[in-house]
Image (tube, grey):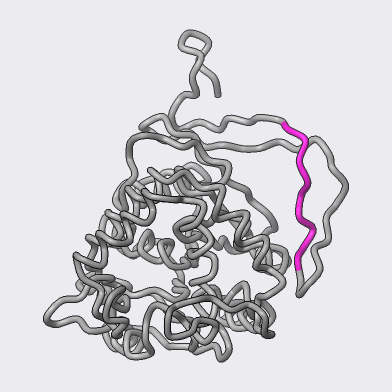
């Protein structure tokens, strides 16, 4: 809704804009199937700090909210949404600063992202909902539970994420070191190098982002990426490059800083809903021990490894991921 006095969206209200854009009918394997270009309403929810968030609701049934990762957007679940919408009410959103949501100068923190999610679910009057979080999206869910508890959450699915990124004396299962390349050795010095790379040349860094969410076996000893072979998700690579490049550097930098400061290990025991922990066996980021730790810390969690997949396993092996997720959501 637009305030006639101020000319700005009012918080807590739905605001729609109309544009001409292609809508996905579904994406499978190497083929994209698009419906004809048409006028479509683009719904936005306006947060209490006056940021417009784009969201979509498809299908009917028990609600499932899909929360994307850093530098991604709702379209990174384009291989899940059509399948899930056949049985569930699927809610996808673009986190602030991503996709078709507004790019603000404020509120670029994990606590604010969790509040955005809370506001949207309350506005849509969602109850007994399931949440699926990929990478940063998993941390948004962890922060949501930290702030608002697990009440009202039916199930949680985590896609390739750890509760803590930086190394600590009692935490060896975070990100690998930039310099040492050792598992769990990512420290403050590594973090500064990453931030410097983001600041220096976003277009070049965005290509690295797209490459790193794929298989670690695609990199040589000098961390050079080789896409000449055959691997799961290869057909998606040009699209992944384009989507990563769309991002605004200051948004990614601010959210990365917030992300790297978090330690959600104490929150894991508070996630009392059944939890599916899906991870890529060729992920560049977190080792299997991370998921064993999480499964032990969470009251009702189980792990599902994906062979031949990296961080973006739901993009690389959508058929199996969708099957595992739908079976999990169906369970009593």
Residue shown at 50% from the left, 81% from the top: 219
Q: Is residue 216 visible?
A: yes
Residue found at the very far front of the displayed protein = 222
Q: Is residue 332 visible?
A: no
Q: Position of residue 317 (x, y in %)?
A: 64, 80
Give whichever of 257, 131 is nearer the camera: 257
Q: Quadrant of residue 12?
A: top left
Q: Give, as a single range, the part of the protein colored magenta.
A: 19-27
Q: Position of residue 326 (x, y in %)?
A: 62, 77
Q: Position of residue 93 (x, y in %)?
A: 54, 50
Magenta segment includes 96: no
Whether residue 287 is situated above or below residue 103 in the rendered picture: below
Whether residue 147 is situated above or below residue 103 in the rendered picture: below
Q: Position of residue 274 (x, y in %)?
A: 42, 79
Picture mark count: 0
34 vs 152, left or right, is: right
């Amino acid at each position: 809704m637009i305030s006639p006095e101020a000319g700005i969206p009012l918080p807590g209200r739905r605001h729609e804009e109309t544009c001409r854009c292609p809508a996905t009918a579904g994406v499978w394997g190497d083929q994209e199937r698009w419906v004809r270009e048409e006028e479509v309403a683009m719904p936005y929810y306006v947060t209490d700090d006056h940021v417009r968030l784009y969201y979509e609701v498809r299908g009917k049934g028990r609600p499932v909210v899909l929360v994307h990762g850093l530098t991604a957007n709702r379209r990174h679940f384009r291989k899940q949404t059509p399948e899930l919408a056949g049985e569930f009410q699927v809610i996808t959103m673009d986190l602030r600063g991503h996709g078709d949501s507004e790019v603000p100068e404020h509120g670029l923190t994990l606590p604010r992202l969790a509040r955005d999610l809370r506001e949207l679910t309350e506005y849509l009057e969602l109850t007994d909902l399931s949440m699926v979080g990929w990478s940063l999206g998993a941390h948004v869910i962890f922060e949501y539970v930290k702030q608002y508890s697990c009440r009202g959450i039916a199930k949680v699915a985590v896609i390739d994420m750890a509760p803590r990124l930086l190394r600590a004396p009692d935490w060896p299962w975070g990100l690998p070191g930039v310099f040492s390349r050792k598992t769990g050795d990512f420290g403050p010095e590594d973090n500064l190098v990453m931030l410097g790379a983001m600041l220096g040349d976003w277009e070049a860094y965005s290509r690295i982002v797209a490459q790193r969410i794929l298989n670690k076996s695609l990199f040589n000893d000098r961390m050079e990426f080789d896409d000449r072979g055959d691997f799961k998700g290869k057909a998606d690579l040009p699209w992944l490059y384009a989507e990563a490049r769309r991002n605004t550097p200051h948004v990614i930098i601010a959210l990365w800083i917030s992300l790297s400061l978090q330690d959600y290990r104490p929150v894991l025991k508070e996630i009392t809903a059944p939890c599916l922990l899906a991870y890529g066996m060729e992920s560049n980021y977190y080792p299997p021990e991370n998921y064993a730790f999480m499964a032990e810390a969470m009251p009702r969690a189980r792990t599902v490894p994906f062979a031949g997949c990296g961080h973006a396993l739901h993009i690389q092996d959508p058929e199996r991921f969708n099957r595992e997720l739908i079976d999990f959501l169906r369970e009593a």
